[in-house]
Image (tube, grey):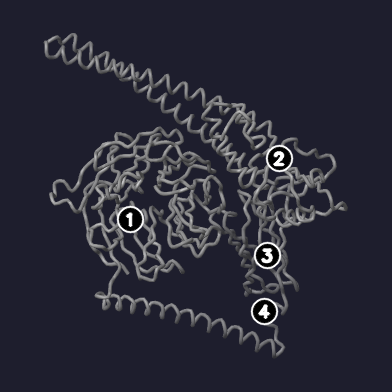
Amino acid sequence: MLIPAFKLELNNPILRGLAAVGSYNGDNPSLTCATSAGKIFFHSPNEKDLAHQIRFLNINRKISALACGKLSTKLSRDVLLVGAQTTLLAYDVNENSDLFFKDAPDGVNTIVVGHFADQSSPLALVGGNCSIQGFDEQGNEAFWTVTGDNVTTMIFCDVDQDGQLELVVGSEDFEIRVFRAEEVVSETTETDRIVALCPMRKHTFGYALVNGTVGVYDKPGVRRWRVKAKHEVTSISGFDLDGDGEPELISGWSSGKFEVRSDRTGEVIFKDAFASGVSSILKADYRNDGRTEVIVCSEEGEVRGYLPAGEELGALGGAAETDMEEETLRELYQRKQEILFELRQYEDQAKKQSNGERSVGLVPAGTQVSIKIVPSKQDGCLYLTLRAANEARIKAVVVFAERVFEGESFAVHWRDPGVELHLPLRPPKDVSAELSIKALVGGRATPMFHVFELTHMLPRFAMYAPAEGTSLIPPSSGVSFVLHERPKRVRAWLNATFNTEVSTMDDETLNQGFVSLRDQHLLWMRMTPENGGTLHVNTEDMELAGEVLQDLCVALQITELESIADFPQEMEAFRSVLLKVDECNAARLKLTAEMADSSHQAKTLVIKAEDGRILGDIKGMRMAYSQLYALNSNLIGEYNKRSNNHEQLLASLKEVNHMIQKAAKLRMGVAKARVVSACRAAIKANNIHSLFKIIETGHPPPDQTV
């Protein structure tokens, strides 16, 4: 339970997710919030002069990210980091000076500060447009890697409990990725865009999605619990309320709701409400009394501090526990009545059956429901087929599955029940999923049905059906790599992940084609005995080839892998993207120079108009203002051109970063990290030939050092 500790009315709006608490003089904390009109305000509770408790800092840019931390090894105080659309500012608040100001062409969506990737000094890690950059205290780029989509949130967490912090990254493509330096060691697919992550204890972390889902992961891919609400989650944090060493999950919502849930069960422990949406949830010893408070900021500028309830509030806590116990007893009593009613129904049916009467709705003993997944090339989907034994009838089926259905569930209801029911599946991505099935099964023409609860695993690449016919020609593009494994193990992996049965008379080779049910494109797998075993994955889709390779390596526990990639169509399209980047950069420089000249002319005209006013030259003043009006219209037009050019540049840079990630996923281990760093070096040097060579072979040319 939490008790109120303090309340502030700052009378300034606080932008969502843009708040932090920093000690900028090394001693006293200061609440730092981004507000409207490109400004930041600081609230210092230890400032004796009330007039100076709130101070403002003009950034004059739209603020997109805000953080603070000990970035400089020479300073014992925190540094403020402010991200705008394409810039990063490191600011020493105490000295009122910049540490550095850097351009960030990939954008700044989120910032974290800490030690990472074997760096001896802290880094400011910036998540942007499909990339993550790390800057040291001098503003030098000390780290760079790519990710699948725009980064939305980042945290440090020791997910593998090896004593080294990994970087957990959430992005717009529904993925939670874990980075160890440049290498992605884990990927977890969620059901919607990730909006927030927070470290809990050791390897556990909390997460929040844009669809109102919050939950806790024990480790990547292993979820403890999750709940979903109709409102949007705006902020989450971990805080130990009961002193058991396990932080509870605190969440704030767009409706103004603020609640604390058990880290183990997700049960609500405490809740409160604000008049406006929650902007940020922070933790700090804000009053310098040795106790850490939970600080909740609302979007309208209301700030509340909370403390865990101590022993002095035992009576209040006891009353709250009594209320909770009474509510639990009521729920258990209601559940008891439902179970007793169900038991009486079973007893009545058993009695009728023992007397030789036909029990209405009772299916024969031993009735089972079989499950099969059947691909349909004609309909472009999979059919989940359920069949009941003993001539029982299936009235309806409800299927629950993550990442398969929009809304995570799908229901089919038949007017005339039959022994077999077909339910279409069209998963948008290639992910494995557990199908939780509830089927209503009853006898012929009966009003009563039994609920059969079943589970079935949907293989990751189930949307690829075996290719049939000898006239099909394998794609010319693809990736090849040496694989010292028996074809039998590869076939076992194919059978498990492609929902098919691959068999061959030759144990030394493998030749199997698949057709995508989504777009009818081909995917071909060939294994030959060259070099002790070479596997060829042929497809025109470079991203699909990477996903197949990564899944195979995980299944066969392969940690290091080199490969040769050949995707001429994608590389030609990539060449066009690089040319587009050059064009956008050239246009940006030209537009910037032209706008600078126009701005200088505007200043000259303002001075000329003011001189005319002072000298009484009304005609000259009017002429100057008329010219200024026309110049201002031109400036607005030039700004719109620059804005459109910037959007095109961002889209092109995103494609560049995405291509680097696709090239990296065609390798494993050291080779994967090498591709990322070598591609970055080639792009900085504007060496297109070298970049293409790295993507193809995984190695930089001899004249390029990484």
Measured in 3D between alpha carbons, the distance from the residue under mark 2 to the one under mark 1, in whole angstroms, is: 47 Å
Mark 3 lies on residue: 416
Which of the image's four quarters has the C terminus? top right
Please tell me whether mark 2 sits on a helix, a strand or a loop: strand
Mark before the other along the chain sequence, 3 or 2 = 3
Q: Position of residue 218 (x, y in %)?
A: 50, 63
Q: Which mark is residue 362?
A: 4
Q: Nearer the viewer, residue 324 or 530?
A: 530
Q: CA distance from mark 3 to mark 1?
A: 57 Å
User: Nearer the observer, disc 3 or disc 2?
Assistant: 2
The structure residue drawn at horizontal position 43% and vertical position 37%, both measured from the top left corner, is 107
Q: Residue at x 64, y 36 (%)?
A: 699
Q: Earlier in the sequence, mark 1 or mark 4?
A: 1
According to the picture, the residue beneath numbered tag 2 turns out to be: 479
Disc 4 to disc 2, C-alpha distance:
56 Å
Q: Amino acid at mark 1?
A: Leu
On residue 623, the disc is none
- Marks 4,3: beta carbons within 8 A: no
Quadrant (top left, top right, bottom left, bottom right) of the N terminus:
bottom left
Q: Earlier in the sequence, mark 4 or mark 2?
A: 4
Q: Position of residue 528 (x, y in %)?
A: 81, 45
Residue indicated by mark 1: 282
| First of labels 4, 3 by sequence position | 4
Outermost residue, bottom side = 355
Name the side, left or right, on which 548 lies relative to 314: right
User: Which percent across, then down, holds residue 43?
Assistant: 22, 49
Q: Give how far across and how far down residue 14 sits, in percent.
A: 29, 47
The residue closer to the viewer here, 151 or 141, is: 141
Counting residues from the N terminus, which is met first, the one under dot 2 or under dot 1? 1
Q: Secondary structure at mark 3?
A: strand
Mark 4, other Cα within 10 Å: few <14 / some 14–19 / many ≥20: some
